[in-house]
Image: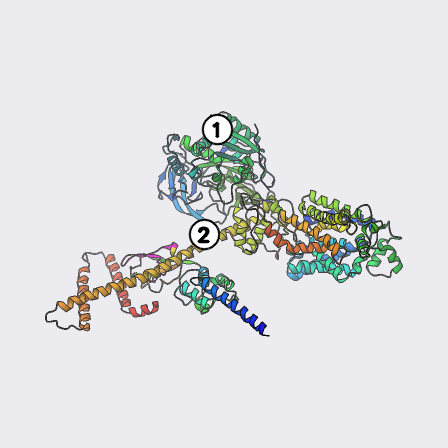
Amino acid sequence: MSRELFKFKGGVHPPEHKSESNTRPIALAPIPNFLVIPVRQHIGNPAKPLVHVGQSVLKGQMIAAADGYISAAVHAPTSGVISNIDLQPVPHVSGLPDLCITLVTDGLEQWIDHGPIDYQALSPAALRMQLRDMGLAGLGGAVFPSAVKLDPGAAHTCPTLIINGGECEPWITCDEMLMRERADDILQGVAVMRHLLGSTEVLVGIEDNKPEALAAMQAAAAQLDFVVEIVAVPAIYPGGGAKQLIQTLTGHEVPSGKLSTDIGIQVFNVGTAYALARAVHHGEPLISRLVTVTGHVLRPQNLEVLIGTPMHTLITHAGDRDGTTGVLMGGPMMGMPMPDLKVPVVKATNCILVKSSELFPTLPKALPCIRCTRCADVCPAELQPQELFRFAKAGDFGRAQEYHLFDCIECGCCSYVCPSHIPLVDFYRYAKSEIWANEKEKRAADLARERHEFRQFRLEREKKEKAEKLAAKTQAKRAELTTAPAGGAVASEADAKKALIAAALARAQAKKVEATPKNTDSLSAETQREIEEIEARRAKIRELAHQPLETEEKLK
Amino acid sequence: MLTAILVMVSIAVVIGLALGWSAIKLKVEGNPLAEKIDAILPQTQCGQCGFPGCKPYANAIAKGEADINQCPPGGEDGVKKLAELLGVEAKPLDETHGTPKPKSVAFIDEKICIGCTLCIQACPVDAIAGAAKQMHTIIAAECTGCELCLPPCPVDCITMEPIIEDLPHWKWKHPVINLKRVA
Amino acid sequence: MPAPFILDRSSVTQVMAWVLAALLPGVAVYVWVFGPGILVTLSLATVTALAAEAAMLKARGYPVKPFLTDLSAIVTAWLLALSLPSLAPWWLIITGTVFAIVVAKHLYGGLGQNIFNPAMVGYAVLIVSFPVQMTQWSGPIELTPSSLSFAQSAAVIFGGDFPKAALDAVTMATPLDTLRTGLLQQLTIDEIMPKSIFGQYGGTGFEWLAAAFLVGGLLLWALRIIGWQVPLAFLAGIWLTAGFLHFFDAGRFGAPWFHLFAPSVMLGAFFIATDPVSGATTPRGKLIFGFGAGFLTIIIRTWGGYPDGVAFAILLMNLSVPLIDAWTQPRIYGGSKRNGKDPSA
């Protein structure tokens, strides 16, 4: 049966370059000597390290725990010893380091105790917590913690579950190969998703340029005890974008600024479904993933790679060649240039694309925008990229937001077709990050204002309270003094004050005696010196305290 | 002639009444201009402008008693925004009030701190935690980098640490497309 | 430099080259109908435009080569040349071209920054300043007693010694001029139309030129260099406005087909109003822009002081582009609002 499909606006047809890497079967990547495992591999709070340097860990052991609801745990991808917990280069376009746990592998692959989870017996909330602790995050590229996405929220059910096998980015074939070779496992994962979300309709969208994957998934779906509709969708970039796939399959648009769950649809990547199946049916946390190693290498292929494997070892494994001009993580439309080949494979790494000047010629110089609106024609978010560019370039971020900057999915279609070769997406990323930074700054300023105002209020209040207290106390003391002293007929004000001061002095004296340290004998030379140092400092403070007027004046 | 005078006078009276009425009826509480100025100021509360905090400076600007270029933490950008708001010409920062520095937070060397609480009293935003004779520490997220805690410290244990760019703070840069230079 | 790392094979140069190529059928018909004089005009305008462009780029500190090879200056030159009378004197061509490139384009910031169509600014300046020279059209060869060779055309254009009588033998009023003059003499359309200058639909020969521009325009549309909105709306604006007037008083207002098949309309619809830089960018904005230009063209032709109104109509619509764009922001994916924000808000 064929389903009525809908067309989203825009999109482009870049050369696919899939056949380079999808002709070889999935292979296991060798275990490197050490793994570098970042604690921030997902959206949300970074995981908190649980191990210490020198500790031996087993394969699958949690080495950093999820911190909060939107977070995911991190596990040891193989057995070995923790050698470092420090800042290391990570796959990020900035080239900035981040906190990583380095694991020296022992090659023994000793597993921690693990086994299948009886997911139907667990409450959904408990199961989600378990999945969070197994480190599950979306493997399509956004790495949003899966446990959060598997929560249908207030609606308690999410009628439509879409499994994304679109994989529209050129060069990448890891999802395709996964569907061709491990379709059964994927659908086992889908069964768990369906259970958690209470979905009544399950759709798998696969671009029609992957006939083998479609056939394999259809065969696997026929074995299931529930209905999964495998749908061939037209191959067009970015047809594999979640919002675009939703529109293609259902005709619905995700309202701007809302989530797909708000219209009863949740989307997962096929890789996530597979990882979920491994977690639930085998008790294996997310410690490896499929990575397409392609481009300017001798044997482009898909490898099953342990998280934390340095990228250069994979390029070497696939056969590195002379004339490499750089490496991308991801595809040519949305990928990121890697600042360093030592950076590890993370949960988001779907592809390592090695560039050469033949495959990726230097981009021509940009010319001014001629407002031809080709970008608007191809924009799948139906924005006006030429206007956004104008505002972003001029720093008019308010107008950029008015023109829906934050609906941009950064797919790169606009830059791809621009006859003036303007790096449009760069401008949008820049504008977005400026707006976020401004927002943060504004929040910080508001906090500071609030705290300052509260402090002013507090000081005022304290002053008032102190004055009241003092007044009351003086009153009481005066009363005491006027009545107590023998023959105290007429105590003048000055006398009363003097008496007060004397009393205070006596009290202070008593306190001082009390405060004399008791364990002054048998101290080591070092401790003695420390005490002397502190005493010296105290002396200095006392000295300073003797000139309070000066400081007070300064404060005024 | 008389009619003309009468007409003009009555127009003046009517308009005057309308103005007077609206001045009473449409009165805005507080000083909206000072609020707007205060919203632009960085809220460092550092007092470099010569006023005890951002709000007093904002009030002074609103009254025309202070110039717009006395806030080093706000930088040239801040001056520009103030100029825009007030419809005056932007001018360079007044160097006598200090120069802009990279955004920093104070850091207390806890080994040296003697717990004198002088810095706590100096902090304009209560961003220092601690008590007498107890070690103090800065709540970095709330520190505005005003440096007011530096002079009172008797043991000079407070240093200003510039905020280093790490992953959560990293920003995309303005793309460089120089039309005038061609490779 | 971040993603994307691949590009489609399009470029400004390619876009401009296709525009020039699409003008070639028009140029060929021009030569066939009016003689080879246009080739002199085109060459002179091209050379002038390139020189002015190079000089301005140098003066503004921009590299000359990448901007000169984008061909945008030549497109401006050709559009202006094709709008000028075929026997316009050399200084007229140079003045118009220089004004278009220097003032309308570069003084507004160069490629992509001009708010007015440079060719139309050049044309408007010329027709306002030199109305007599701007109506020196050679008539269609089949209607005039004699015609000019390439060398003779060059001689006329460069002000060579050319007998006045011979010149009079080749020039004649354009159909729009004739119509205008006729109407001013209180003649009715039925009395004016039988004149030989009027052909089947438009003017004799002129209608062929219009058809050639239409062919070139359709080529640009087929190649997706231009969208369908502006030309269609422009032609609709002409046809509906002219048709409306003609319906009410056929004696005083020309037939819509006649207005549609003036070469200036086809050139304007497919080549000038579609200029992306000075035109509207949103889909609905393009429709408004095109229709407005068509409507104003007829209004100016009918009640204005000049026989043709395409240039002024397009310039007036250029002025309204920021407003049109701001008011016609399209709905986005997942958006609910149909309208963009009020630009004043």
Query: Residue C172, how many percent across, how many down?
Result: 84, 55
Q: Amino acid at mark 1?
A: Asp
* Residue A285 seen in render: yes
* Position of A356 relative to A544 (above/below): above
The residue type indicated by label 2 comes to His
Which stretch did the figure color magenta? Answer: B121-141
Residue found 45% across the figure and 52% down from its top? B169
Give the residue number, with chain letter if any, for mark 1: A184
Which residue is label 2 attached to?
B169
Please state if A429 lies on the left or on the right of B107 as rendered.
right
- In terms of secondary structure, what is the magenta stretch mainly? loop
Q: Is residue B13 above or below residue A256?
A: below
Let me know if residue C270 appears in the view.
Answer: no
Q: Is residue B143 above or below residue A74?
A: below
Would residue B140 be counted in the magenta stretch?
Answer: yes
Q: Is residue B25 magenta?
A: no
The answer to whether C13 appears left or right of C181 in the picture is left
